[in-house]
Image (cartoon, rainbow, N blue to C red):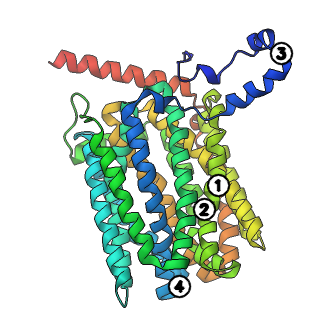
Amino acid sequence: MDEQPTHATTHLTPDPVAAAEATPQFEERPRRFRALALDLGPLRFSRDYRLLYAGQTVSFFGSMMTFVVLPWQVYQLTGSSFAVGMMGVVEFVPIFLSAFVGGALADYFDRRRMVLLAELALACGTGLLLLNSLAAQPRVWLLYVCAALFAALNGLQRPSLDALMPRLVPPEMIPAVSALNSLRWNVGMIAGPAAGGLLLASYGPATTYAVDFFSFAFSLAALWLMRAVPPPAGADRPSLRSVAEGLRYARSRPELLGTYLIDINAMFFGMPMALFPAIAKGFGGSATLGLLYAAPAVGSLVASLTSGWTHRVRRHGLAVALAAAAWGAAIVGFGLAGSVWPALACLALAGAADMVSGMFRMTIWNQTIPDHLRGRLAGIEMVSYTTGPLLGNAEAGAAAGLFGVRAAVVSGGLLCILGTGVLALLLPAFLRYDGRAGLARKRAEEEARAQALGQAD
């Protein structure tokens, strides 16, 4: 069933025949540029989405500064890339377990309140990092404890945060929401690490943690002003049985399995961030470290700002696979770069490819999963997109210890490309997936559930 354009997307899909008849040829080029522009429709449509978007933008900016400083502190105190990589192992178990719990809770409790409580706890964890950095001898073990705590809290929060989106805007706006969320992520990943690196070089880690701590005040206020988002009708009580139901649903959908497995493969083999402190040491020190962390987001930002074309793509699975392979190729280029600017350019290309993959994965998830399962599936999604980077950092650190930094990066990129090709061959239904059919299926499943609940009453 073809989708009908809505008020949020009509301006992005001009009729080329009508345009040619109604306007001179010199006006065609601006129309084409507008067709690529970011769609701001969701921000105009929903007050609660505006509040959520603004609060999470500020909070994420602060968190990305901590994202730079925390591994830097571990490296400074230990001098070991392996120790930095092991932070991924420390974070993996808490996030793996809490994501399933968070998903079940998101389908049963008020999703806005779940996000607010987790945000408050994250602020307390950042305060603990601040106190540790002010000590005469900061404790390495406490850095690992905080990393594990953040992972657990993110696992509890993120499913509710992801499951909020389909409740705040209509399904037709989901591609635009994906692009806007990508923009927020990109701005945070550029400005946060860059500012964190500069603050770190000028004032030390305590100041950076302090800025992150106070950034939570804005996000907490925005969440407080939002309206409640109660659970869907007939919500399943959190239990092992409800978690298992979500897992069975995910396993039954090849388009969902493809998004999980291809992203895990790309991030496990092609995630070199644990090596950034060591690479930055050869390229100029802590100031360069911030640039390395920010460079992928520069490419991601360009991809987000020119994302108007994404709503015309229907083969979302194929787009994810191609973008994952492009990520691997860019990481190979990064590993082979002999100076900082080519390295940053390759990281920017990698970030653009990853953002394209992320936008289409998010569209598949939010346009096809019924609301009563959205939280549990968001937990599974979180496991998929965090497992790869966390274990990938551990793999990169171990490979660098055995074979050297450059060999670890290049081999990881090559294995990413190879793994993407193998998974694409094993999941032909994923490559054939059409977004229009997925949206129609979601509507049919939700209508069938509403009828079943009505008959039960």
Disc 3 residue crowd, few under 14, some 14–19, many 20+, Cα 10 Å: few
Give the amino acid at mark 1: Val
Element class at badge 4: loop
Mark 2 and mark 4 in contact (Cβ < 8 Å)?
A: no
Give the amino acid at mark 2: Ala
Q: Give the CA distance from mark 1 to mark 2.
A: 7 Å
Q: Earlier in the sequence, mark 3 or mark 4?
A: 3
Foreground disc of the pair 2, 3: 3
Q: Residue placed at 43% from the left, 45% from the top? A: 54
Reading the image, the residue beneath label 2 is: 294
Q: Quadrant of the N terminus?
A: top right
Q: Nearer the viewer, residue 196 or 449?
A: 196
Q: Give the CA distance from mark 4 to mark 1.
A: 28 Å
Reading the image, the residue beneath label 1 is: 298
Foreground disc of the pair 4, 2: 2
Foreground disc of the pair 4, 1: 1
- Residue 272, placed above or below residue 359: below
Give the amino acid at mark 4: Ser
